[in-house]
């Protein structure tokens, strides 16, 4: 087993230089890509997990130069995304240099095409880096950008009738081919993946604000939003019979046709999409399951 671990560590160490990328074109800062066919791309949650793995690896790494280089590129991930934030707070899920002069997703957003935005791993990654280096000062100038990021999420992807966040569609959602979202109509799925990690994202924002000495009411605002989202997940996504979480269908409304469907109309709550897949387990890692058992 020890030899197996050493071989894996050697492979990763040999591969690290391949994923630490230099600035190119409109990607102005060093960054980390996930490798493979995504060579040269800056991805939202891919960069988070790459940084998560690399920083844990560095705990047993004696080379201080490599550690500093990884931290520089990790910060660069954040700087690159914030550098391409649009005026309304939208941040793309992915930045790729191609035949266009700016990120493709930003181009489409400016054209009025509704698409998903940066998955809720921006503040999570900031905290991941800052906790490791024990310094939050490097992100101080970007607080207003982070606030606009959340404003965009609440304006375009939050459904007040159920208190949950909703994917625009199934494009670049991270959990590819998740049957609860794949091929479904736009803004129809409050995916458990999105909402679970939005809880941690809101908590991370509160932590960032607290580190910057922000007003207590501002910190509490994000903590309260996280608590409200937890409550909504418990109420809307928890199945009491199965004792399990699911994504939910929020595309619930009366669709009239000619003289049919007249009268009272449909007034039911969002209903569970009972596809068991990876995202359905994410709330368990945040202790939401235990709270739901106590609640019901």
Image (cartoon, rainbow, N blue to C red):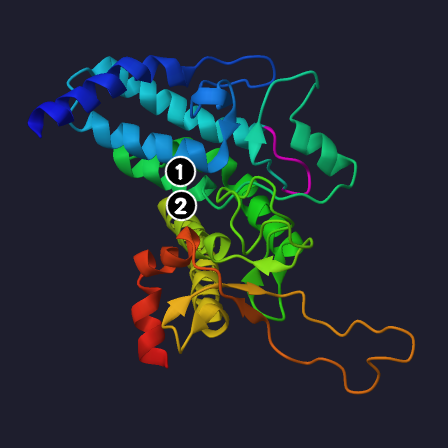
Residue 32 in the image, given as x and y percentages of width and height: 42, 23
The residue that disc 1 covers is: 126
Is residue 85 a member of the stretch shown in magenta?
Answer: yes
Q: Residue furthest right?
A: 258
Question: Total marks drawn?
Answer: 2
Residue at position x 36%, y 41% from top?
127
Q: Nearer the viewer, mark 2 or mark 1?
A: 1
Mark 2 in CB contact with mark 1 (< 8 angstroms): yes
The quadrant where residue 52 appears: top left
State left or right for residue 23 relative to residue 259: left
Residue at position x 29%, y 32% from top?
53
Q: Residue furthest left?
A: 2
- Label 2 packing within 10 angstroms: few (<14), some (14-19), many (20+): many
- Above or below 214: residue 260: below
Residue 165 in the image, given as x and y percentages of width and height: 56, 58
Residue 126 in the image, given as x and y percentages of width and height: 40, 38
The quadrant where residue 93 appears: top right
Q: Nearer the viewer, residue 16 or 170?
A: 170
Residue at position x 75%, y 35% from top?
110
Residue 146 in the image, given as x and y percentages of width and height: 53, 43
- Above or below 119: residue 106: above
N-term mark: 2 or 1: 1
State left or right for residue 139 relative to residue 103: left
Measure how far apart labels 2 and 1 are at the Cα level: 8 Å
Magenta segment boundaries in residue numbering: 84-89
The residue that disc 2 covers is: 208
């Amino acid at each position: 087993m020890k030899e197996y671990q050493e071989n894996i560590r050697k492979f990763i160490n040999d591969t690290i230089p391949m994923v630490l990328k230099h600035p190119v074109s409109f990607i102005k800062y060093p960054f980390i890509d996930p490798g493979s066919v995504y060579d040269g791309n800056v991805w939202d949650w891919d960069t988070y997990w790459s940084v998560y793995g690399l920083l844990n690896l560095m705990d047993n790494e004696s080379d201080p130069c490599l550690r500093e280089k990884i931290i520089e590129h990790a910060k660069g991930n954040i700087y690159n995304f914030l550098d391409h934030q649009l005026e309304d707070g939208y941040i793309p899920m992915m930045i790729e240099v191609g035949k266009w002069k700016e990120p493709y997703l930003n181009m489409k957003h400016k054209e009025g095409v509704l698409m998903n935005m940066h998955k809720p791993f921006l503040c999570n990654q900031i905290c991941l880096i800052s906790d490791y280096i024990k310094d939050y000062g490097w992100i101080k100038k970007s607080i207003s950008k982070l606030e606009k990021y959340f404003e965009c999420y609440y304006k375009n992807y939050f459904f007040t009738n159920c208190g949950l966040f909703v994917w625009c569609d199934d494009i670049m959602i991270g959990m590819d081919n998740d049957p609860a979202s794949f091929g479904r109509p736009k803004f129809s799925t409050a995916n458990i993946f999105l909402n679970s990690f939005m809880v941690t994202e809101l908590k991370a924002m509160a932590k960032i604000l607290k580190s910057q000495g922000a007003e207590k009411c501002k910190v509490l605002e994000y903590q309260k939003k996280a608590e409200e989202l937890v409550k909504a997940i418990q109420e809307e996504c928890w199945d009491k019979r199965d004792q399990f979480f699911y994504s939910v269908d929020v595309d619930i409304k009366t669709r009239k046709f000619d003289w049919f469907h007249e009268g009272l109309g449909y007034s039911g709550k969002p209903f569970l999409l009972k596809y068991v897949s990876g995202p359905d387990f994410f709330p368990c890692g945040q202790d939401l399951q235990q709270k739901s058992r106590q609640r019901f």
